[in-house]
Image: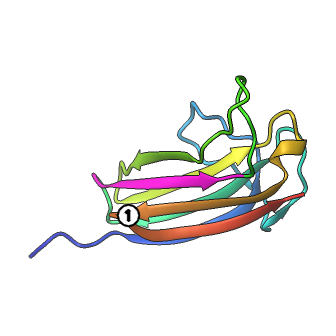
Amino acid sequence: MGKRRPTFKMYSYGEYSIWNRDSHEIPKIMDIKTDIEARIGTEFGYVLHIKNGKGEVVEFRIDHPPFTDDEGNIRPAFTGEQFIRTNDYRFYLGDCIWEPLEDKLGKWEITTYYKGEVVAHKIFNLK
């Protein structure tokens, strides 16, 4: 019998408590919504619950409004991957608003892929 395909379910989405990137703890959901009132330090995104995926990898992409880096270049989408550590795994994917606030306003599109297939997708409007 072959290995079972992982299952993916969006557990929650919206505004979260501040996330400690050095911790394995998922931030706490503050409010379920896609229209986010933008303030410096606001954390937003989603939690993906993955079952039967131990040892697999998911890729992600965060498309954001055009803003520049320190050299004045437009920043590309944020991309990366996450290794699934257990067969009952929760994965937080999101971002936090930083200064300057004005260039972070607009549409943020967050997508997670498994073997090239979209398994989670959410659009947030920062206003």
Looking at this rendering, what residue extends furthest in the left direction? Answer: 1
Q: Main secondary structure of the magenta part?
A: strand
Q: Is residue 56 magenta?
A: yes
Which of the 4 quarters of the picture holds residue 107? bottom right
Mark 1: secondary structure: strand
Residue type highlighted by circle 1: Tyr
Image location of residue 8, percent across then percent down: 45, 70
- Please determine whether, in this image, residue 118 is positioned above or below residue 40: below
Instruction: Please name whichever residue, 18 or 125, is drawn nearer the observer in this view of the structure.
Output: 125
- Please determine whether, in this image, residue 43 is positioned above or below residue 14: above
Image location of residue 2, percent across then percent down: 12, 73
Q: Residue at x 49, y 54 (%)?
A: 60
Q: Is residue 61 magenta?
A: yes
Image location of residue 27, percent across then percent down: 67, 48
62 sits to left or right of 6: right
Which of the 4 quarters of the picture holds residue 89? bottom left
Q: In the image, which residues are magenta?
A: 55-64
115 sits to left or right of 126: left
Tag count = 1
Q: Residue at x 60, y 34 (%)?
A: 21
- Please determine whether, in this image, residue 61 is positioned above or below residue 114: above
Image location of residue 57, percent across then percent down: 34, 53
Residue under label 1: 114
